[in-house]
Amino acid sequence: MTLITQEAIEMTKTRTKVETLTWAYIKRESGLYEASDNNGGLTFGIHYMDDTGQDVQDAEWYVTEDERAKVIKTEDLDVIGNFELK
């Protein structure tokens, strides 16, 4: 019988690919939002990507960069891109 360690299980997990971005970047690049639109104060975002890292599957927004960083660390997310204007 072969025992599988927790470490071996962790090594086989696929980390979720994400991009970090700011609302300022989205406003500038999309051209879809009024200059006054502040996304309800949610400035720092995470785009959850598909397995290929090419298409956005979901997005979450946070008030502070620290809140977003905590989620990235807690969920062990794989940051594959950074699109930020401050």
Image (spheres, helix red, strand yellow):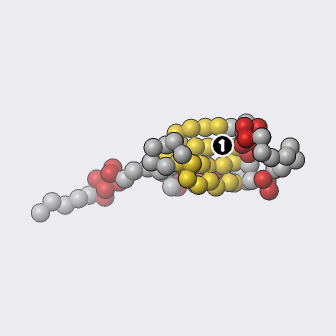
Identify which residue is drawn at 51% across, 55% down: 75
Please tell me in which quadrant of the rendered image residue 2 appears: bottom left
Image height of 28 relative to 64, above or below: above
In the image, residue 20 above or below residue 7: above
Residue situated in front as seen by the camera: 5 or 84: 84
27 or 66: nearer the viewer: 27
The image shows residue 41 at horizontal and vertical percentages of 79, 54
Amino acid found under the numbered disc labelled 1: Leu
Determine which residue is flagged by label 1. Answer: 21
Mark 1 burial class by Cα count in 10 Å: few <14, some 14-19, many 20+: many
The answer to whether residue 18 shows anywhere in this view is: no
Q: Is residue 70 left or right of residue 8?
A: right
Is residue 14 rendered to the left or right of residue 66? left
- Under tag 1, what secondary structure? strand
Q: Residue furthest front?
A: 32
Residue 63 appearing in the image: yes
